Amino acid sequence: MLDLIAYILVRALNLLFRFVPVSLTLWLGRRLGVVAFFFNKKRRVIAYANLKAAFAKEKSPHELRTITKRVYQNMVQTFMEVLNLTKVNREYVDRYVEVVNMDLIRNAANSGRGTILLTAHFGNWELSSLVSSVEGWPIMVLVREQKMKRLNELLNRLRESNGCKVIRKGMDVKNILKALQEKKIVGILADQDAGKNGMFVDFFGRPTSSHSGTMEIAKRTDSIVLPNFIVRTKGPYHKLYLEEYIDFRNTPSKDAVRENLQRYMSLLERYVRQYPDQWLWLHKRWKSTPLRTVLVLNDGKAGHLNQSLAVAGQIQKARLSQGYKESDTKIVVVDVKFKNKFAKLALSLCARLANWRCQGCMLCMRACLTGQSYDTLMKTYADFVVSCGSATSAANVFMSKENNARNVIIMRPGIPGLKNFSLAVIPRHDKPPSRKNVVETTLAPNLIDGDTMRSKGAKIRQLVRIEKSIVLGLLVGGDNAGFMLTKDSTNKIVMGVLEFCKANDAEMLATTSRRTPSESESILKARLGNNRLCKLLVVANERNIEGAVAGILELSDIIAVSGESISMVSEAIASGKKVVVFELDKKTKAVTKYERVLADLERDGYLVRTTPAGLGAALERTWKKQFSGKGTNDREKIFAAVRRLI
C-alpha cells in the first residue's frame, strides 16, 4: 500500500512540475530540506557525526550544523530535480549545466575502449548521467534498487527518459561487462561503505572500506575510468567537472587496483572538502573502519584518570578480541576545566536536559568551560567517551551527543543521571541501582594487571638493587576533602614501616602522590631518602617515574597504603599481595564513605585496617597470617560489558 501511495504521489508531482518553473520547485525543495533537517533525527545525527569525523579539527559545531542543514536542502533539491528529469533536453543542459573538460569524454568515447563514468552521491548525480546522453554519449547506469518496486520502476523510467539505460538488479555485473566489452559508457556510483570485506583506503585520514569492484572491472576489461563530479553552483545551475583518466595501462603495479581506488577516493575527498554540503553524508561512511577513538575526560584527579584509562583499556582489549589491532583503538585524554564552580553546576543541570538536538549547538559547553578546554574538546572526534566522577559527567553527556558516540561513566554521575550513559561502572560502595546499563564492581577500576606489573617491575629493578627476600611497598597519599596527612601521622607511618623491615630483615620501596603535603614529603625524604632499608623513594611532585606504583606492587610482598584514596587501595588489592591500609586523620566526625568501603573490604578479607600508630604491628600480624591472594572478577565484568557495548 505504501509503495502504491508513493508511486501515485511521485507520478502526480512529475506531471505537476512540468508546468512549474524549475526555480520554484527548487525553492520549495530548500524549504522542505529545512523541515527534514529539524525532524529527521536518525539520519541527521549520522550526517553530523560524519562531518565531525572529517572536519573536527577545522570547523566549529556551528559550522558543521550549518553544513548539515545545507546537506538536507541539497538532497531535497536533488529529489525535486529528479521529478523534473523529463524536462532535461539540449536547451535545459545548455542553460543550466556547464561541462568542464568535455574533450575527456569525447576522446574516451572515440578511444575504442569501454569507459566507466565514475562518480559519487555528490551534487545532483542523477542529472550528470542525463547530461552525457544529451551531449551525444548515452550511458548505462548502475543504480541501487529501492524496496518499493512500483516507485523504483517509476524512478528508473525517469532516469531513462533521455537516452540512459538503467542496469536492473540481477543483471548488473553481467551487463556492465558486456557493455564495456562493446566499448560503451557505463555510469557507476562508488562512495558508500563496502563492509568489512571491502578494500580499505585512506579517506579523511581514516582507513575506509570502499568498493573495489569498479577498478577490478576496469582492469579486467581494459576500460578507461573517467571520474566526474557535478557541483550545484546556485539553484538550478551546475558545473560538471570531468577529471583526468584513471587508466590501468599507466599503472603496471601489482597493487594497481588499490592504488587507483585510492586515487579516486583522494579526488572525492578534494571535492568534498571544497563543497562539503554537496556530498550525501547521511549514510554511515565509516561504519566498517577499524580505527576508533576513545576520548577520556580528565578532571585533574590522578585516581579518576587511572580508572578511566582502565576502562578505556578494556574497550581496546574487547576490540582486540574481535580481531582488531591494538593500534586500531586510539585513546585520547583531554582535560576538562570549568570557568568556576557555578559553571560546573550549571553544566550539570543542562546535561540533565540534553538530547540529540544539542549536537552542533554546544553553547552550554562553551559558556561553562575555559576557552582552551572547550576548543580542544570541540576539535576532538570520538567513537567512545569515558570519564570518572560527577565533575566530568556533564561534559561526557554533551560530548556523546556531539559525536553520536557511546559513553561510559565510572561512579555515580550525579545530576546528569544514569539515563544519559550507555554504560555505568559503579563500585559496590556507591550503591549502584539495578539497571541494564549498570555494572557493579567490588573495587574501583584500575590499571593493575599481571602484564603491567611485570613490565613496570622490570624497569624498577633496573633502577635499584634488591638484596633481601622480603620487600615492603609503601604507597602514601595525602589530603583530600575528608582526610589529611599530618606531620605526626607521617612520622608514625615511617616508624611503623621501618619497624617491620628491621624485624623481618626486609627492604622497602616507597612512593608518594601529588596530594602528599610538602611537610610530609620533607619527613619522608629526611628519614627514608638515605636509609639503607629504603631502596627507592619516588616523590611524585618532584620526579615521577612512569608506572612507579605498578612496579612497586610487582616487586613487593606486602603493601602498606593510605586509605583516603579508593583508587590507590583498589590498585594495591588488584596486585594480589597482602594489603594493610592505614587511615589518615579525619576532617569530620561523621562516618565517611571511605571508612564504610574499607570496613566492607576488610570484612570480605581483602585488606587489614589500622592507624598510623599501629601500622608496624598490623604489618607484622598480616605478614604472619596465611593469605591466598584473594581477587575479584571486576575486570571480567567490565570487559564483558564493554564488549557488548562496542
Image: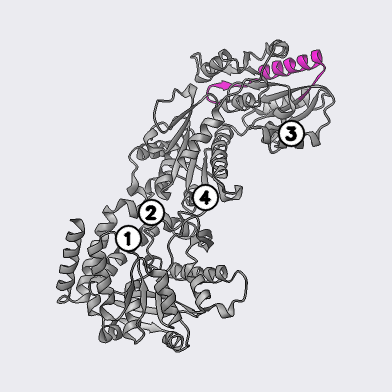
Residue linked to disc 3: 457
Q: Is residue 393 magenta?
A: no
Closer to us: 623 or 528: 623
Compute the Cα span from label 2 to label 4.
16 Å
The colour style of the image is: one colour
N-terminal of the pair, mark 2 or mark 4, is: 2
Residue linked to disc 2: 46
Q: Badge 4: few (under 14), some or many (20 or more) residues near its Cα, within 10 Å?
A: some
* On screen, residue 409 above or below 103: above
Residue 267: in sight, yes or no? Answer: no
Residue 432 is drawn in which quadrant? top left
Per the picture, the main secondary structure of the magenta-coloured stretch is helix
Q: Are marks 2 and 4 in contact (CB under 8 Å)?
A: no
Q: Is residue 493 magenta?
A: yes
Helix, strand or loop at disc 3?
Answer: helix
* Amino acid type shown at disc 1: Lys
User: Comparing marks 1 and 4, which lies closer to the viewer?
Assistant: 4
- Residue at position x 73%, y 25% in the image: 556
N-terminal of the pair, mark 1 or mark 4, is: 1
* Range of magenta residues: 480-508
Q: Position of residue 301 (x, y in %)?
A: 56, 34
Q: Badge 1: few (under 14), some or many (20 or more) residues near its Cα, within 10 Å?
A: many
Compute the Cα span from label 3 to label 1.
55 Å
User: Comparing marks 3 and 1, which lies closer to the viewer?
Assistant: 3
In which quadrant of the rendered image does the N terminus lie? Answer: bottom left
- Residue at position x 36%, y 58% in the image: 282
